[in-house]
Each structure stands twice: as C-alpha cells, then as structure tokens.
Amino acid sequence: MSLHHNQPKGLFLLFFVEMWERFSYYGMRALLVLYMVKYLMFTTEKAGQVYGWYTGMVYFTPILGGYIADRYLGQRKSIVIGGTLMALGHFAMAFPPLPFFFTALILLILGNGFFKPNISTVVGQLYEENDPRRDAGFTIFYMGINLGAFFSPLVCGTLGEKVGWHWGFGAAGVGMLMGLAMYLWGHKSLLGDKGMKPADPSDKLYVPFVLVGIVLVFLIASAFQFSGYDIKGLIPGWVYGLTAVLVLIGLAYNYANTPKSTLTLVEKQRLAVIFIMVFFTIFFWSAFEQAGSSLTLFADRETNRWIDIFGWRWEMPASYFQSVNPLFIILLAPFFSKMWVSLGETGREPSSPVKFAMGLGLLAIGFVVMIVAAASYQQHGPVSLLWLFGAYFFHTLGELCLSPVGLSLVTKLAPIQFGSLMMGVWLMSSFAANFVGGFFAGNYDAMDHTKFFMIPMATGAGAAGLLLVITPKLRKWMHGIH
C-alpha cells in the first residue's frame, strides 16, 4: 500500500519523534494511578483527582506553548525546550520522595505545552494550502502517536509492575531522550526552514509573562494541595474553568492590540469553524477517555481475562487493554489514509464536519456494545474480553474519522500567525474533556452500569445529529477548504 506516496521526507522524522514522545507519555500514564494507589498510598478518590488534574493540565498548557512559539520562539525551538523539560520530568519520577513526584508532574505538564502544539503545526507546514496529501500525511503522523502508545503500556507497565515503579518511569524518560536525540539529528536537513521563525514577532512581552506566571502559580498551588499541605481542601473545579477563560481572554486581548492581527472576514469565519469543531470534540473525548477510567474498571472487575490456548492459561492484566485502541489504529490507519485519498481523487470525500459526525456516531455504537456487555454481566457474571475489544474497535473507527482530520483541519483553517495558538485551542478540548470525563467516571460505582454507558452513547449520537444539521453553514464558513 503506497501510504507514503510522495509524502515530504520531514514527515517521517516527525513521525518517529512523536512516536517516542507518546511512548514516554503513555508509558508514564499507564503506571500513574497504580503507582499512586499502591506505592504512595493515596485513596482511590485522591488518585483519580490527581490523574484528572494531570491529564487535564497536559492539554491546557499547549495553548500557552503555542502562543509563545507563534510570537517569540518559533515552533522548532519550542519543540526542543518541551522535549528537554519532559525528559527531566520522567527522570524525576524515578526518585521516590513525594516532592519529586509533583515536581515531575509539573515539568511534564509544562514540557508537553511547548512540544505538543508545535510538532503538529510543523507537520501542517510541510504542505501547501489545498494539498490533497495533507489528511493522509496527518493519518501517517497519527500512526506514529499510536505506535508509541501501543508499546509503552507493555514495556513501561511490565517494568513498573514486575521490576519496580521507578524502572517503569525511567524507561519512559529514555523514550523521551530517544525522540529528542532523533529530532536534533535530523531536523536541519529534513525540515529546512519550516517553523524556525515566529509567525508574528512582537515586542509586547508583558501579557504572556503574566499568563505564564498565572499558570505556574496555579500548578504549584495545586501540587501543594494534592500533597496534603493545604488545610482548605482541593481547588474546586470551577477555578480550573475560570483560569482557562482568563488565559484565553488575555491572549485574545494581546492579539487584538497588535496591528498585524487584523483579520479578514474569511479568516474570522474560518476561526469560528475551529471553535465550533472544538466544542463538538469535547463530547467525543470525554466519552472516549473512559478508556483510562470506567472501561479499565470494567476490564478489571467485570471481564473474564483468562486466555486458554492448548492447556496454557494466562490472565491478561487489565492495564494491557490500554494497548487495544492503538493496536487497532496501527492496523486501520493505512486503510483510512488510502480511503480519504481515493475518495478525494473521485470527488466523493466527505467534508471535515461530516467526518466528525461519523466519528461521534461510531463512538455511540461502541457504547451500545458496552450497554449489552454490562447487561450480560448482570445476568451471567464476568463477560468475554471480546466485548471490550468490540467497543474499542468502534471507538477507534470513530477516532480515525475525527482526530487526525481535526489536526489537519486546524492547520488548514488557522491564519499563519495563529497556527500554533489554534493548535493549542484544539488541544484544549481534551483539557475540558478530561475533567468532564473524570468527573463522570467518578459515578461508576454509584450507578447501574447499563445506565452509565447509556449517557455517553446518547451524548455522542445527539452531538453527531446536531453537527450534521449545521454542516451546510460550517462548509460555507470554511470558504473552499474541504
């Protein structure tokens, strides 16, 4: 299959760099809750809150990292800074005392903010505006993400659970160093001058530094509260939302006061499409992210994980289910990439909003599978692991219709001076979704499980229907971008 047909050489460098970065992220994430509960002796509730705080903040800081890259550093310097901070964070996790634990999480959150939006933006810069290879290129890049995500729970999870927690975290750090070394080796020859200079240089430094200060104080205060030093309890959820809104207002104000930021009507309408699509992706990811919480609990408690092959018996660890979705992506992404190109060549490729609606619909079907599985458990006890495989299969089909297409769409619709900032806005949908999904998953023990899975099924199907209704308007506002 000629998936890489005529793709820019730089794409394959970024593919491998992102693969190692995701190896480090998902390897650490696979161990995080188990480490807190079994080693740091946190309560399940506290471990869940720290997990939600960490996975949420990882998707919040890209809006600042993207902004700083657009205005001051350029994408390429930001990628190096982010990779370095994340490597330091992973190695800090390899030290046992608690202060190291929260220092490590803060380094990882900040490093991800510099790295994540900028590497995706550089991928977009490899293509001209209406290049038909772009969606296929992002699907290839997406396979790199999932190759790392597939191997990391198996490598870091096995080391962490069987050898020692800090060996698992150390392995994640080695993965990050590998990615950084590859990038430094190849970026000059393979990427040329893409992403070297800021798109919109400015001498107004005060606003971003105030915003970075707010985020740093906020991160450190949260960490102190979680470590148990604060007597007033945890920061209430609305403070996170308020902080996000203040940061967005600050960024918008700084842009509005720069002469270069005058946008045409076409650019404004395309930006509006990005924000509308971000809103719909929150419905997708808040349901999809049940994989790390309620679906893992279903795997642990309600699934028969024993595999018998010719008298050989093995119980599949619940954490290994985290590798099912990336495995499906690796197997299916080439077909999706080829399908979009083939449909594009014959003029039958669905528009991006229709692809999003398809993604939400497929997500809902995955939860229909879980409703049947939960009902079966209530009748007959532990269910076959094929039920979870089935749900993850539909969720993966949905993800391939939505996530790489969304990354590609942002790079197509965002004006050049807002490239990385808009990628940060796109990633903020995951910030909101992780908090919503974590809060929802907290009800898993309190609710009937068939009713529990009906909620994400209904929100996914409803969002898909609403998106199809407004698609004609969105296509008009996209002004010729498919």
Image: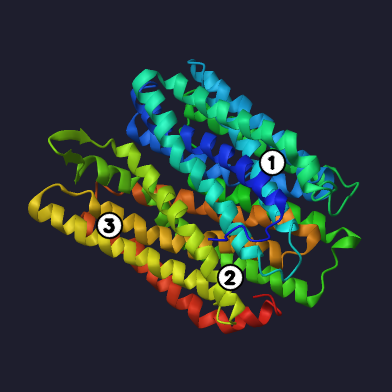
Instruction: Read off the residue under disc 3.
Output: 452
Q: Is mark 1 on a helix, strand or loop?
A: helix
Which of the labelled discs sits on residue 88, or is there none?
Answer: none
Place of residue 433 in the rendered image (x, y in percent of width and height, measured from the top left): 48, 54
Circle 1 residues within 10 Å: few <14, some 14–19, many ≥20: many
Using the rendered image of the protein, determine whether residue 63 is visible from the camera's viewpoint.
Answer: no
Quarter of the picture containing the C terminus is bottom right
CA distance separating discs 1 and 2: 32 Å
Q: What residue type is labelled 2?
A: Val
Place of residue 117 in the rendered image (x, y in percent of width and height, measured from the top left): 66, 49
Q: What residue type is labelled 1?
A: Phe
Q: Which amino acid does label 3 sit on?
A: Phe
Query: 189 above or below 459?
Result: above
Q: What element carries label 2?
A: helix
CA distance separating discs 2 and 3: 38 Å
Is 434 or 94 nearer to us in this picture? Answer: 94
Q: In which quarter of the image is residue 308?
A: top left
Using the rendered image of the protein, determine whether residue 51 is visible from the camera's viewpoint.
Answer: yes
Instruction: Read off the residue under disc 2.
Output: 341
- Please report the residue visible at 61 percent of the width from the left and 42 percent of the height from the top: 16
Dot in front, 2 or 3: 2
- Is 436 on the left or on the right of 364, as rendered? right
Circle 2 residues within 10 Å: few <14, some 14–19, many ≥20: many
Circle 3 residues within 10 Å: few <14, some 14–19, many ≥20: many
Is 211 or 170 nearer to us in this picture? Answer: 170
Is 104 or 318 nearer to us in this picture? Answer: 318
Instruction: Read off the residue under disc 1.
Output: 114
- Dot 2 or dot 3: first in sequence order is 2
Q: In which quarter of the image is residue 393?
A: bottom left
The answer to the question of whether label 2 and label 3 lie on touching residues, with beta carbons closer than 8 A, is no
- Please report the residue visible at 34 percent of the width from the left and 68 percent of the height from the top: 458
Query: 446 above or below 185?
Result: below
